[in-house]
Image: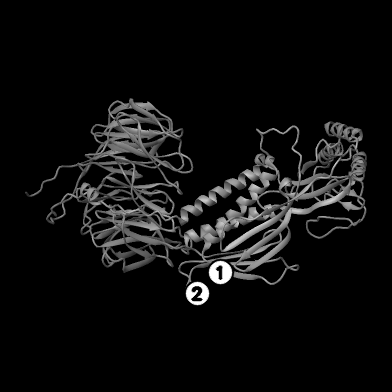
Amino acid sequence: MTALQIVKGNAGSTAAPQPWAETRATVDLIVDGMNLTGRMPDAELAPLLRDLAVAVAGLASLENRRATIRCYSSEGPWELGLERSADQVLLSLFRGGTHPEIAFFEREVDLPALIGAILSAIGRLEGAAASGGARAELDHACSLLLAARVVSPTKQQAVTLVEVEPEGEADIRICAELALRERQRPASHDSTVERADLFSLLVRGTLRIGIGEHTRQFPDTFVYLFAEQLLALAGETLDAWEQGRSYYRRLDLFGVVLGIRVKSDGDSEGGPGLWFTVAGPRPRSQGEARTFRLTDAPAFVEASVNFGRTLVRALLRHDPAERQNLRVTNFRRALRSLDERLREATCEDTKVNPSPEIYRAFAAPVATTPSDPREASKLRYSAGWTASFPGIDLRATFLCGDHVVVGGSRETACVSRRTGDLLWRRATQPAVSVVTPLGLARLFADGSIALHDFGSGDIVLTCQVAPRIGGIVTGAIVSSPGLPRMLVVSEGKRHLSAVDLRSGEVRWRHTAHGGSMFRLRRAGKLLVVVAGDATLSAVDLGSGEIVWRTRDRLRFAAHVGLDHDSLFAVAGEPDGKGRGAVRLHHLDPYAGTTRWVRELSGGPSPLGAPLVTDHEVVVVTRDRRGLGLLALDRATGATLWSSEPGLFPTASAWLAIDESIIVNSAAGDLFSLATHSGDTRWRHRFPRGMEGDQPRRLEPILRSGALFVPQQQVHLVRPRDGAILGHVPTELIPDLLRVDERCDVYVAEESGHLASFRAGPKLSLV
């Protein structure tokens, strides 16, 4: 026989191996001139020989017909698979993982020759290579192998031809024919233990791929490994199709070369579609490569899922023990997940509310009388009180009526907003804090919810929901006349639950089919739900029923923009270079009907919720240069004006007020842009201070007609003309800014300081 060597890099010599003690770094187990294990650098020789001797002893006595030995090296674990076939042993060398590697498969070796080679190798392993406990283990393994009696099998293993052919008609058909050996179930099989066993899945067969009237056959293919890699390719293809971006991949799947090309919606050459290429590997390619055009990406994904599901069913019928194979378990889980995603992406379950007037009347805005323009009057502030809270959590610090609730790493405290006196302090665990009309709700990681009274800090209500899985906790507060006071909170992985703040019971639970990242927005009696999937839904706050639902192939993942009778939602997940498809939907928030849809592809990526004014909708865009703006006509979706990204830096905050967009940037700039033209109405540049002393949050706050702007100090600006109304004399960096109804200002710094500033009295002509 000729020597077989697996060499990393250049092939080595096939000469006879050196003594084991001199070549410890290279494992060469040679039987009749055949190198069985190849060259695996830095492999531990003593454990390999020990496990090999024990496994071969079991094969010789027919205690087991199959065995797998793992050999660890610096390049990762290799596995040596042995299977008894008559008086021969079939040896396979492979490596598992996400992308398996097969060195050789089912090489026949005489069992007596293999036993002799193992005993000879153990005998040549000197004390320098194996000493102490390793030597004792080798001696024990050697004694087992010597005592093993070679038992000839009474009958040959039966071979069953299994046809794997999914049912149904599809654009692409993937089938296979397998020759499976009958395998004996181990006597000591434990159904409570699952193990990853790649060796039992190494089955060769003939693969057939048919498209239309054309069929290609590929013999001697590892069908299961092909199905695993095909499923991963189908998942990437579905991702690209859902995001509306171009995708191209060509790879060799264990002797079958597949090419996938998905064109984006904005591709001008040929339009969107999927091109599928199939060929054999060079130089033994069977015929030329053929390229076919499929109807769409879901056709390829559906064919891949159907083939994988049919293959798994065939393997489980032949050998039910594969149910305890972790590799099969993970593959079945991936099949279910991709099938759910495919059904969600191709489902047509759009729903329109036939009676929108009920909800429209509930959310009717109260008419307001515009105020007469007056001269800008200055506001004067004086320091009120200062408090310190170690380990302050700015996300858990709130202004609640006459109380200022301050959350920390180990405790929650409450002070009077008038005097700064400490009202109560409670030791608490880390949790998400939410302000409700009845107290401070704290949501813990285990799903428990505790409601603290504002006045005393005592827990007045507790309840339990499922722990949040796979995302941050989000929610909304319901406190309107005619509606029960509820806390709508994300629960588990795909659920929204409405918790009654009076009784603590869950009134209803909504399930998102495909997504789990919730974005919520109140629209009167409706709750608009964005879940990160292809659906945008509106839920009745009283009953939890879905009132309307709209669908897009692209995913809804961003916050929505809402203004009276208009709802704007962005669908799509563009990549960092803005190549993914993006659409802006304009809907009736109470009926769910679509008024227009505008493609936003081919430019910078949208950021955040659309900004809605009386006549325009403005989309903030982003790329590596910074942020820009795109203004569209609210009625038609036509482009009014746009500014390239770089107009203001990424670290900025913005606010829509009447017919202007106010932008506050970390560079110290505050400016106002007209929404109908994009012209700059006014601009201020404030001192920046030292690097790193910028506020953590830059959102301006509009209160009583004045704009409170956090910069190095808190500046007061009139939004209509940019007139400076005053500033707050604080030495704290306004990492958190709160303003009450009297225009009193509360400033919190991340260092743990909290300060109050009172607005001085002013005279006005009545």
Residue 103 appears in which quarter of the rendering?
bottom right
Whichever of labels 1 and 2 marks the residue nearer the N terminus, that label is 2
Q: Position of residue 107 (x, y in %)?
A: 83, 52
Residue flagged by tag 1: what amino acid is it?
A: Arg
Q: Vertical placement of 501 versus 608: above or below? A: above
Under circle 1, the secondary element is strand
Query: Which callout, 1 or 2, points to the residue nearer the camera?
Result: 1
Quick one: 265 or 622, which is closer to the camera? Answer: 265
Residue flagged by tag 2: what amino acid is it?
A: Glu
Q: Dot 1 corresponds to which residue?
A: 293
Under circle 2, the secondary element is loop
Left or right of residue 704, residue 713 in this image? right
The answer to whether residue 197 shows anywhere in this view is yes
Q: Position of residue 215 (x, y in %)?
A: 65, 66
Quick one: 146 or 434, which is closer to the camera? Answer: 146
Q: Dot 2 corresponds to which residue?
A: 269
On residue 95, which mark appears? none
Which residue lies most toward the bottom here? 269
